[in-house]
């Protein structure tokens, strides 16, 4: 039911943008920023609670000091890769994000096999290629703000010229991986396959027709973050480990701390010069946070699949 509601909200957003009152760039930016603050940041702010529950589920000891040490080391290590090797770092970020998005959307399927992992990552790559490459003219100014974007102008221009070839290859890889996966897992209910394909088609339709910023807002903020928060809450309330109020308090606390950190980082990096700068630095922040966040969520989804406590 939740997925249907989220898809309907995406369809309504598309209807307004295409046929009723198109949102100008400033309004799109405000919607994006509010969405990031209200849902995007909180869905990652639960990492400490999720990691604690992961340790409890696997009957391992948990140390907050060790958690923050490893978390920050991963964060700074990936930040260093982005700083010293920006092209490599951004490509790694795309791969990490693709796997993370795919794992969240496909949690109901058994994806621990090689074909399952290919299914997951090519799903995410097709989603990201539609969001980013179909609207690449909107993304190029963000790249050009950074010195790394200017240094890699040849690659960026190549990507611009060949973007629909890349989208086509992503589509072929996804449908090939999906065909192989379902062929090897023929015990998957036909109803599950049908619902998945319909949902996926609607998501692609929405993302293809919305501007990049609204498309990213719908997928990351509305779809991904809401589903993640729902799954996180389900996971944390398993066996009455946490109450809903305690979960909300922790998420609000760490969300506020994260937003303060982003603001301080932005002030030192001229984040607030214009809307493109804000978008650029927020994307950069998401890239840095993806490395530690996706490992914690990966462990959570492994546990959820085993216990079959996630609601379809």
Image: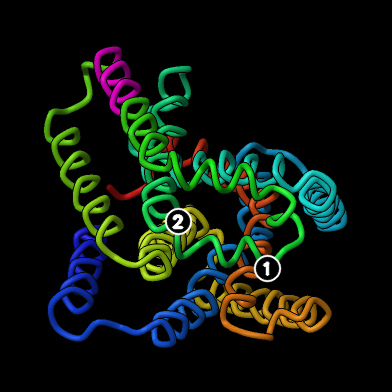
SS class, disc 1: loop
According to the image, label 1 marks what residue? 145
Around disc 2, counting alpha carbons within 10 Å, would you say few (fewer than 14), some (14 to 19), or many (20 or more)?
A: some
Residue 139, x across and y down, in percent: 51, 62
SS class, disc 2: helix
Residue 275 higher or lower than 139, as above or below: below
Q: Inspect this view and state whether residue 67 appears.
A: yes
For image coordinates 70% across by 44% down, the residue present is 87
The residue stretch that appears in magenta: 175-184
Residue 44 location, quadrant = bottom right
For image coordinates 62% across by 67% down, the residue present is 45
Viewer-proximal residue, 188 or 156? 156
According to the image, label 2 marks what residue? 136
Viewer-proximal residue, 309 or 102? 102
How many marks are shown on the rendered structure? 2
Horizontal side, residue 142 vs residue 3: left or right = right
Around disc 1, counting alpha carbons within 10 Å, would you say few (fewer than 14), some (14 to 19), or many (20 or more)?
A: few
**Dominant secondary structure of the residues highlighted in magenta in the image:** helix
Q: Earlier in the sequence, mark 1 or mark 2?
A: 2
For image coordinates 19% across by 39% down, the residue present is 197
Residue 301, x across and y down, in percent: 49, 41
Residue 4, x across and y down, in percent: 19, 60
Residue 23 higher or lower than 149, as above or below: below
Viewer-proximal residue, 102 or 275? 275
Residue 81 location, quadrant = top right
């Amino acid at each position: 039911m939740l997925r249907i509601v989220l898809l309907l909200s995406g369809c309504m957003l598309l209807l307004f943008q295409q046929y009723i009152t198109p949102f100008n760039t400033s309004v799109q930016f405000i919607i994006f920023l509010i969405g990031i603050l209200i849902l995007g940041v909180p869905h990652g702010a639960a990492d400490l609670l999720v990691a604690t529950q992961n340790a409890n589920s696997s009957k391992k000891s948990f140390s907050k000091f060790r958690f923050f040490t490893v978390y920050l080391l991963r964060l700074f290590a990936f930040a260093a890769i982005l700083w010293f090797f920006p092209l490599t770092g951004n490509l790694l970020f795309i791969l990490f994000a693709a796997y993370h998005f795919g794992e969240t959307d496909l949690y109901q399927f058994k994806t621990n096999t090689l074909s399952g992992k290919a299914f997951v990552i090519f799903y995410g790559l097709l989603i990201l290629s539609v969001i980013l490459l179909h609207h690449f003219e909107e993304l190029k100014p963000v790249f050009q703000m950074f010195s790394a974007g200017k240094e890699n102008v040849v690659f960026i221009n190549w990507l611009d010229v060949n973007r629909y070839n890349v989208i086509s290859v992503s589509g072929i890889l996804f449908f090939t991986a999906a065909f192989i996966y379902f062929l090897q897992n023929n015990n998957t209910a036909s109803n599950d396959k049908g619902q998945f394909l319909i949902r996926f088609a609607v998501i692609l339709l929405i993302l293809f027709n919305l501007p990049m910023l609204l498309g990213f807002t719908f997928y990351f903020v509305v779809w991904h973050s809401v589903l993640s928060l729902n799954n996180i809450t389900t996971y944390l309330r398993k066996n009455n480990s946490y109450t809903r109020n305690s979960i909300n308090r922790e998420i609000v606390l760490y969300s506020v701390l994260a937003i303060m950190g982003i603001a301080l980082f932005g002030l030192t990096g001229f984040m607030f010069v214009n809307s493109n700068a804000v978008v650029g630095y927020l994307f950069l922040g998401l890239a840095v946070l993806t490395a530690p966040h996706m490992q914690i969520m990966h462990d959570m989804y492994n546990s959820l699949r085993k216990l079959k406590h996630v609601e379809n």
